[in-house]
Image (cartoon, rainbow, N blue to C red):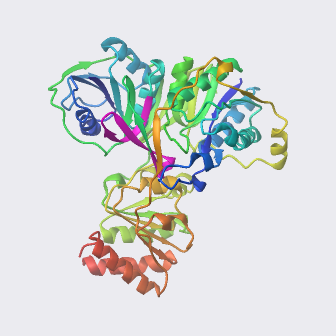
């Protein structure tokens, strides 16, 4: 089988190699990337940026692969979907599992799953963090491509951010609309500090109130958690938020509304006023951990 | 300038139901307008107003059985019309039992080509039920349009579009040529609930139904199978009786027991 892998960052090469190595009988795996070359692929095409029309041109040159496997990031998603459309190929996105040639993905905002049986040629994106491994097809020959996509990038600005990486944090304290004022968030920051964790938030806190930067936003359109403990404070629990915390080992919710949906998706919940509960919890955690 | 919007009638996440074997009871789940499609219609209205164009709604009923879903589907389309659409062209076909992006894009492209061919088509960034996020680029490639996804602002200028795209760690401002397909995020605007007057007016706007065969398309067997609901594996221990001090003590001992809180 011939596979074309697509990534916009070197940190996903292991995900792609892991998925591809599980396909079996792969003779050739070409990587198209906009980051530094790496991984044990057969060949690497390095491009300035990942866009659909560029991918379509590369496929035109190397011939249609049996599978195109992209990492599920927004850049790659757009590009491989466009590629699929330009060649009338089936596409399945955000794949989380593979068995024989049947892939699994989440549907219904994480409340369900569905299977899809692949018959190549086909295009996929794989969810980050679900596959890992190494190919043994390299070291790859690296080809630099200077071609430009038809979409012109006028400017690029980093989102304002604090440098926190809640996706790789083991412990996250999430804040939601239960907090009355921006100043009150310090209660959550104190707890996170006592726990040795980070602070995340629900959509309104980042997108509507702009109390916290978007790199703390937990949601399908934001960051996804995969640590050992998530404490959701004053968060009612929109499906998109809950889904993004699905992979956490233990979920705790603190909310004064007993009927908040979040309680259905938690291991331990306290029905109570966060303004009372948080200071006590922080004190007890400090005592326990001696910090 | 006329602006098209691809709208999805999505399974209502608040009323999910499963069969005894755990499979999703699609037949019994109501349909609602997919969340970000409201933003798409709202944005289309804004652009059409400033360029004296129409807003054309396109939709394809993908959930089954069509006869039991048709009423919900029509309500979704009427809502899109109330939110700012001027007319709607939709496919309702009894032979359909599920779809996938490749087929949905094909159906939408046929509708768009047959009815109006607007040079700007807007979609939501993802549907709330299948969340593939691939319809906009797939449709663009099928129509031969340019594409920009995850737009959080959109401007038409000099025969092209200028879009701020949210690409995870940064915001990219891009310029693309028209015709184009653009998918929008929830941040692009804040749609208001339609007024009673708008809802009433929506019932007088043209809603044209067609079928696959009338569009010259043959039905496609969906390759998706085994839709199931994830059973919640959480322990759901709810602490509510006792003083705050006692509740926290109990929580802390559970967390120590779980090994997620260490001394």
Quarter where residue B99 is shown: top right
Report the residue at 47% width, 87% height from top: B242
Q: Is residue B262 magenta?
A: no
* Number of numbered discs on residues: 0
Q: Residue furthest front?
A: B20
The quadrant in which the N terminus of chain B is found is: top right
Quarter where residue A4 is shown: top left
Report the residue at 29% width, 38% height from top: A12
Q: Is residue A111 magenta?
A: yes
Q: Residue furthest top?
A: A61
Residue B29 in sight from this viewpoint: no
Residue B22 x, y percent position in the rendering: 47, 53
Q: Nearer the viewer, residue A233 or B59?
A: B59
- Relative to B141, A99 lies left or right: left
Residue B245 x, y percent position in the rendering: 42, 86
Q: Nearer the viewer, residue B180 or A100?
A: A100
Residues in magenta, as a range: A91-113
- Relative to A266, A171 lies left or right: left
Residue A162 x, y percent position in the rendering: 38, 53
Report the residue at 38% width, 82% height from top: B250
Per the picture, the main secondary structure of the magenta-coloured stretch is: strand
- Relative to B180, A151 lies left or right: left
Residue B19 in sight from this viewpoint: yes
Report the residue at 61% width, 39% height from top: B64
């Amino acid at each position: 089988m011939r596979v074309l892998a697509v990534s916009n960052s070197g940190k996903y090469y292991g995900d792609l190699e892991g998925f591809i190595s599980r396909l079996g009988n792969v003779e050739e795996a070409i990587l198209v990337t906009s980051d530094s070359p790496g991984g044990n692929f057969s060949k690497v095409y390095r491009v300035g940026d990942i866009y659909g029309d560029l991918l379509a041109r590369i496929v035109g040159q190397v011939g249609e692969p049996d599978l195109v496997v992209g990492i599920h990031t927004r850049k790659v998603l757009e590009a491989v979907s466009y590629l699929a459309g330009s060649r009338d190929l089936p596409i399945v996105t955000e794949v989380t599992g593979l068995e024989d040639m049947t892939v699994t993905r989440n549907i219904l905002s994480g409340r369900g799953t569905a299977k899809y049986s692949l018959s190549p040629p086909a295009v996929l994106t794989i969810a980050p963090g679900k596959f890992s491994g190494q190919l043994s097809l390299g070291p790859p020959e690296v080809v630099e491509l200077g071609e430009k996509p038809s979409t012109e990038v006028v400017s690029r600005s980093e989102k304002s951010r604090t440098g926190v990486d809640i996706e790789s944090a083991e412990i996250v304290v999430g804040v939601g609309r239960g907090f009355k004022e921006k100043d009150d968030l310090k209660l959550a920051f104190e707890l996170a500090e006592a726990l040795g964790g980070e602070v995340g938030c629900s959509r309104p806190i980042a997108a509507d109130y702009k109390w916290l930067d978007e790199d703390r936003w937990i949601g399908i359109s934001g960051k996804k958690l995969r640590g050992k403990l998530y404490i959701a404070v004053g968060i009612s629990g929109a499906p998109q938020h809950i889904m993004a915390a699905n992979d956490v080992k233990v979920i705790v919710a603190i909310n004064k509304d007993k009927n908040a949906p979040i309680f259905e998706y938690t291991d331990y919940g306290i029905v109570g006023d966060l303004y009372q509960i948080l200071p006590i919890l922080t004190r007890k955690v400090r005592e326990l951990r001696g910090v | 300038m006329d602006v098209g919007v691809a709208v999805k009638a999505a399974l209502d996440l608040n009323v999910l139901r499963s069969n005894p074997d755990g499979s999703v009871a699609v037949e019994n789940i109501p349909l609602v307008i997919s969340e970000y499609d409201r933003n798409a219609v709202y944005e289309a209205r804004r652009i059409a107003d400033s360029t004296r164009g129409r807003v054309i709604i396109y939709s394809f009923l993908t959930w089954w059985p069509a006869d039991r879903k048709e009423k919900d589907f029509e309500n979704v389309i009427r809502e899109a019309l109330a939110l700012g659409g001027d007319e709607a062209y939709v496919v309702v076909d009894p032979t359909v039992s599920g779809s996938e992006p490749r087929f949905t894009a094909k159906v939408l492209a046929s509708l768009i080509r047959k009815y109006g061919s607007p040079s700007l088509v807007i979609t939501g960034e993802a549907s709330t039920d299948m969340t593939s996020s691939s319809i906009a680029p797939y449709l663009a490639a099928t129509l031969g349009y340019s594409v920009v996804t995850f737009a959080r602002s959109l401007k038409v200028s000099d025969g092209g579009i200028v879009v701020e795209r949210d690409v995870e760690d940064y915001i990219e401002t891009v310029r693309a040529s028209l015709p184009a397909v653009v998918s929008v995020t929830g941040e692009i605007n804040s749609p208001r609930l339609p007024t009673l007057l708008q809802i009433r007016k929506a019932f007088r706007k043209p809603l044209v139904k067609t079928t696959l065969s009338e569009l010259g398309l043959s039905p496609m067997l969906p390759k998706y199978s085994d839709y199931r609901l994830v059973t919640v594996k959480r322990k759901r221990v709810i602490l509510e009786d006792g003083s705050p001090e006692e509740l926290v003590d109990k929580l802390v001992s559970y967390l120590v027991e779980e090994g997620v809180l260490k001394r």
